[in-house]
Amino acid sequence: GENVEQHPSTLSVQEGDSAVIKCTYSDSASNYFPWYKQELGKRPQLIIDIRSNVGEKKDQRIAVTLNKTAKHFSLHITETQPEDSAVYFCAARDFGGYQKVTFGTGTKLQVIP
Amino acid sequence: GAVVSQHPSRVICKSGTSVKIECRSLDFQATTMFWYRQFPKQSLMLMATSNEGSKATYEQGVEKDKFLINHASLTLSTLTVTSAHPEDSSFYICSARVVSTNEKLFFGSGTQLSVL
């Protein structure tokens, strides 16, 4: 099955700086890669996603890049704000069957005011 | 985005009792729902895939007789933790995929289960 690795596990940045979270996946057939933000005790919220036929996608301060050859994708947050502090999960979706979504191990982002 | 409702949000029960958790898609039909378990400061681990009108598909290592899943309609899936034990204490969260987009996964608000 799919295996998703995520780094770093914790990340502290100064307000206004950029944050980068990296993930790798194992199944070359995976074709959809969402990113979720989860605040303590809350549900994960989809913040951005990318399909395998696209190399980059941007939504305001958030961008995601995908390198299918290397099976690597990254989340970039620019001009970070304290409200960006949360746990971020990357995920990869299987191509076949029920199209299960496998999550990375999570990155706790702390934005220091 | 699509709304997924999950109840209860928190439940405390005695060891040996059963607990039912409901997951509803409020404004869309979900032929497939997923049940995840999350331990503190850890990732979401897929437990099973719930399919409307058929048996659930369980992940390796998940006891199907302990975690009963019923997907009775296109908007409702239930997870019943049978004969709960303290080690079953965890955050359980459901999700549903919006068929029209065929991709985006939306989550319920989660259920914090504490077994005494």
Image (cartoon, rainbow, N blue to C red):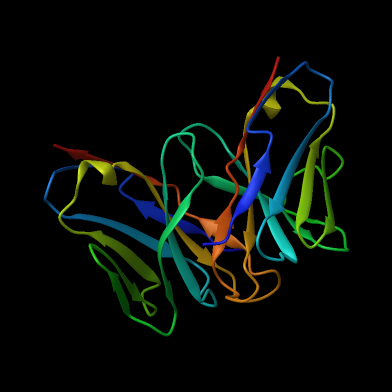
Rendered view: A50 above or below A9: below
> Quadrant of residue A60 in the image?
bottom left
Q: Residue at x 48, y 49 (%)?
A: A44
Q: Residue at x 13, y 37 (%)?
A: A113
> Quadrant of residue A86 in the image?
top left
Residue A59, position in %: x, y?
A: 29, 69
Q: Would you say residue B61 is visible in this rendering?
A: no
Residue B80, position in %: x, y?
A: 81, 38
- Name the outermost residue toward the front: B27
Residue A36, position in %: x, y?
A: 43, 55
Residue A99 vs residue B74, the one in the foreground: B74
Q: How many marks?
A: 0
The N terminus of chain A appears in which quarter of the rendering?
bottom right
Residue B10 vs residue A20, the one in the foreground: B10
- Please indicate whether residue B99 sits to the left or right of residue B39 in the image: right
- Please indicate whether residue B66 sits to the left or right of residue A89 in the image: right
Residue A70, position in %: x, y?
A: 36, 74
Q: Would you say residue A25 is visible in this rendering?
A: yes
Q: Residue at x 56, y 58 (%)?
A: B106
- Name the outermost residue toward the bottom: A53
